[in-house]
Image (spheres, grey):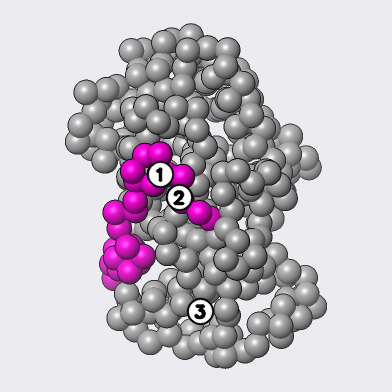
Amino acid sequence: MMKILVTGANGFVGRNLCLALCQQHAVVAAVRVVDCCINGLTQTVAIAAINADSDWSAALHNVDVVVHLAARVHVMHDAAVDPLAEFRQVNVAGTLTLARQAAQAGVKRFIFISSVKVNGEHTEIGLPFTEEHVANPQDAYGQSKLEAELGLLLLAQQTAMEMVIIRPPLVYGVGVKANFDSMLQAVKRGIPMPLGAIHNQRSFVYVGNLVSLILRCLDHPAATNQVFLVSDGHDLSTTELLRASAVALGVRAWLLPIPQRLIAFAADMLGKRAVAQRLCGNLQVDITKAYTLLGWTPPVSVEDGLKATALGLI
């Protein structure tokens, strides 16, 4: 049994990860407010802020592995005067402070949950991102995640602590919020959407599949100082995703077959190009490396992942 520190433990991914870890390991949950507890946890530690001045000593005592989920997350309309500086304070300085203190405390492995945004925002159909692609972040969030990755890999060269970096695309599952939840709610309510003729391909990852890969990386020797992309292993167009979600919810999807070029034109006119890119653009990842090095395959199919997610709305 290992002792594992999970930051962001009361978040969407964190809760799912902690519940899985508690079956076999001692878990220390780092949260902002201690009363946000999760059943079965060995210990909960309050960390008010994640930055260059954070003190992790209380959380790191006798810890074997850190799984760092906590971050300043990407938002559509960032009100910060200098978004990159804000992201760097948490995602770079905060991450590296934790990692340095973890190395000093004798932690054996540090697993950093990064983002596919480090790779970029767009792929051509059939030409997915791999771990070998040159990083090409397009926004402050992706840039901060890349800088954190580079700092962690450098730290791995300077200390005995091993690093593992995982870059997920959009994560979904029971309790998912933001755009994915809005989409499911629209499908459930039978709202007509002009998305019946979208022929893109996008990778997603069910939270249970992401947790599965994290568990595999806890102590697998081949994961040492490696970067992994993760997905469900089955990509979907926006139209296919909506139809599959409707099936999972037991309702009919009202999808109007509006040509993709008209959607893009209308989005440009309305200043919503980024929205159109997410709905119509391609973003695929290749998970061959995780299979080859770790023998890992996603244990939950897209269909079952969507069914589980839909059950949370019923």
Picture quadrant where residue 220 is located: top left
* Circle 3 SS class: helix
Q: In the picture shown, does residue 29 fall above or below 169?
A: above
Task: State the SS at label 2.
Answer: helix
Q: Which mark is residue 119?
A: none
Taking the spot 37% from the left edge, 27% from the top edge, the residue there is 221
- Residue contact between numbered discs 1 and 2, judged by CB atoms under 8 Å: yes
Q: Which mark is residue 292?
A: 1
Residue 298 position (above or below residue 184): above
Q: Give the residue at the far front of this rendering.
A: 292
Q: Residues within 10 Å of mark 1 (few under 14, many from 20)?
A: few
Q: CA distance from mark 3 to mark 1?
A: 31 Å
Residue flagged by tag 3: what amino acid is it?
Thr
Is disc 1 placed on a helix, strand or loop? helix
Q: Quadrant of the C terminus?
A: bottom left
Does the rendering let one see residue 176? no
The residue carrying mark 3 is 239
Q: Is residue 108 left or right of residue 91?
A: left
Residue found 33% across the figure and 27% down from its top: 219
Disc 3: CA contacts within 10 A as few (<14), some (14-19) or many (>=20): many
Identify the amino acid type marked 1: Thr
| Residue marked by disc 2 | 288
Lower position in the chain sequence, tag 3 or tag 1: 3
- Return the residue nearer the eye: 171 or 233: 233
Q: CA distance from mark 1 to mark 2?
A: 6 Å
